Image: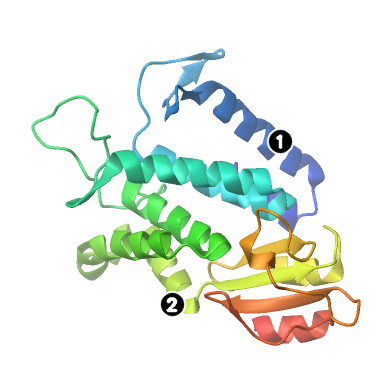
Amino acid sequence: IAALADAGVDLDRPDLIEAACAAAEFVIDHHLVDGRLRRTSLGGRVSEAPGVLDDHGNLAEGLLALHRATGETSWLERAGEVVDLAIDHFHDADGWHDTAHDGEVLITRPRGRTDNAEPSGVSAVAGALLTHSALTGSTRHRELAEEAVAAQSRIVTHDPRFAGWALAVAEAMLEGPLQVAIVGEGEDGPLRRVALASSSPGLVVVSGSPDQAGEPLLADRPLVDGRPAAYVCRGFVCDAPVTDPEALAALLR
């Protein structure tokens, strides 16, 4: 889902974004059963196997990427629901676990730490938590993201080859991540195109109307002299708004 959404934005391919939406709708419609995420399905039939931590982190990240690609608030809301499922069922005073607290009783609850071609569960959820906090201003989610990255410190120190995803989240944390709130401009506007082209680690971009419902980053962000404007923020503290795409590009550099 995330790959299709991001590729659709970067390559200006609406068909890829539509495919990402279809994939996300399938997972939500079929794999969320009685408020819990199931791991696999075949031919439209979902199995009894429960989702594990990386399923929740990766799905949430995909839904957040869809929110970035489409600007639709519903994807942010869905991502928040999946993130909260992960917090409720996979996190306790001892940190993050790969299996849910009410899952099959094992000798010990596993907690994989190493990233490979795919992120470990804790790295996956760390990325989703950080992005969600940047979009909503939730300090709780930010603190949990920092805790998850800190849990990876031993891998980072001893063999960073197996901590690539965790290090990417850590880099985004150090950068802010930057938040760009764009008001008064549609999906194809020049300010939004400049923001989406930025390579700033962990960057989040939200566009819409001033004070648009469901988008905390757009609260108290007015137009400038009746013109579309972009606010570059870090932790919801923003620079003066700009209305010129070149000025926005300079801020993002």
Q: Residue at x 39, y 69 (%)?
A: 170
Residue 62 versus residue 249 in the image, above or below: above
Q: Residue at x 39, y 61 (%)?
A: 140
Q: Position of residue 217 (x, y in %)?
A: 64, 66
Q: Quadrant of the N terminus?
A: top right
Q: Is residue 198 visible?
A: no
| Residue reaching furthest to the left | 107
Horizontal side of residue 16 vs 106, given as left or right: right
Q: Does dot 1 land on a helix, a strand or a loop?
A: helix
Q: Residue at x 73, y 53 (%)?
A: 71
Residue 191 versus residue 120 in the image, above or below: below
Among the 4 quarters of the image, the one containing residue 4? top right
Badge 2 crowding class, 10 Å Cα cut-off, few under 14, some 14 to 19, many 20 or more, is few
Q: Give the amino acid type for the residue marked by disc 1 in the picture.
A: Ala
Which residue carries the number 1 mark? 19
> Residue 206 versus residue 18: which sits nearer the camera?
206
Q: CA distance from mark 1 to mark 2?
A: 33 Å
Horizontal side of residue 64 vs 138, given as left or right: right
> Residue 115 versus residue 100: which sits nearer the camera?
100
Badge 1 crowding class, 10 Å Cα cut-off, few under 14, some 14 to 19, many 20 or more, is some
Total marks shown come to: 2
Q: Give the amino acid type for the residue marked by disc 2 in the picture.
A: Leu
Which residue carries the number 2 mark? 174
- Residue 168: numbered disc: none
Q: Is residue 44 visible?
A: yes
Q: Position of residue 139 (x, y in %)?
A: 42, 65
Q: Position of residue 218 (x, y in %)?
A: 69, 66
Mark toward the viewer: 1 or 2: 2
